[in-house]
Image: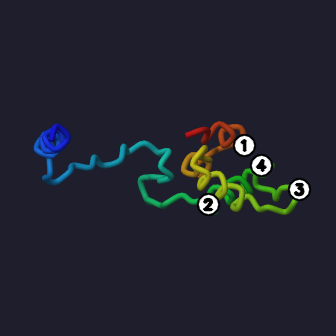
C-alpha cells in the first residue's frame, strides 16, 4: 500500500503538459554533431568528419592496418556507448591537432 501511495505522489507531482526544449546555442559547433554557420545548418556525421580529416590530411582519415575505414571506426566508436568522436567538432576542425582534441569518453 505504501508503494501505491508513493507512486501516486510521484505521478501527481509530474508535469504532464508541453515540455519546453531550448533552441541550440548559436555557437559554431555543438558536441551533438550539428554544425551551424550563418549560411547553413548541416547534420555532421562520421562521413563528414572523415571527409574533413582527409582534407586536413590527418592520419585518422586513413584506413587502419586491417583495412577498416575512418567512417567505420567512427561509427564503431559512436555506437559503443563508451566514447564519442565529437563528429560536429571534427567536421569543423581547422587542423589535425584541433580534431584530436574533439570527442572523448561519455
The Cα atoms of the two marked residues, 2 and 1, are separated by 15 Å
Task: Say whether disc 4 or disc 3 marks the residue closer to the N-terminus.
Answer: 4
Task: Say whether disc 3 or disc 2 marks the residue closer to the N-terminus.
Answer: 2
Q: Nearer the viewer, mark 1 or mark 3?
A: 3
Can you identify the residue that label 4 sits on? Answer: 58
Give the numbered dot on residue 96: 1
User: Could you say whether the residue bearing mark 2 is in a helix, strand or loop?
Assistant: helix
Q: In which quarter of the image is residue 83?
A: top right
Can you identify the residue that label 3 sits on? Answer: 65
Can you identify the residue that label 2 sits on? Answer: 48
Q: Residue 49: x percent and y percent?
A: 63, 55
- What residue sits 62% from the left and 59% below the top? 46
Q: Is residue 66 left or right of residue 89?
A: right
- What residue sits 38% from the left and 45% below the top? 26
Q: Is residue 64 left or right of residue 12?
A: right
**Contact? badges 4 and 1 (CB < 8 Å):** yes
**Contact? badges 2 and 4 (CB < 8 Å):** no
User: Could you say whether the residue bearing mark 3 is in a helix, strand or loop?
Assistant: loop
User: Could you say whether the residue bearing mark 1 is in a helix, strand or loop?
Assistant: helix
Q: Quadrant of residue 14?
A: top left
| Residue 2 in view in this figure | yes
Amino acid at each position: 500500500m505504501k508503494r501505491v501511495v508513493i507512486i501516486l505522489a510521484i505521478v501527481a507531482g509530474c508535469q504532464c503538459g508541453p515540455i519546453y526544449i531550448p533552441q541550440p546555442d548559436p555557437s559554431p559547433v555543438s558536441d551533438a554533431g550539428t554544425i551551424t554557420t550563418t549560411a547553413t545548418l548541416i547534420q555532421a556525421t562520421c562521413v563528414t568528419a572523415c571527409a574533413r580529416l582527409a582534407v586536413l590530411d590527418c592520419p585518422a582519415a586513413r584506413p587502419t592496418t586491417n583495412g577498416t575505414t575512418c567512417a567505420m571506426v567512427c561509427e564503431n566508436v559512436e555506437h559503443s556507448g563508451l566514447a564519442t568522436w565529437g563528429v560536429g567538432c571534427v567536421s569543423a576542425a581547422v587542423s589535425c591537432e584541433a580534431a584530436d582534441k574533439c570527442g572523448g569518453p561519455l
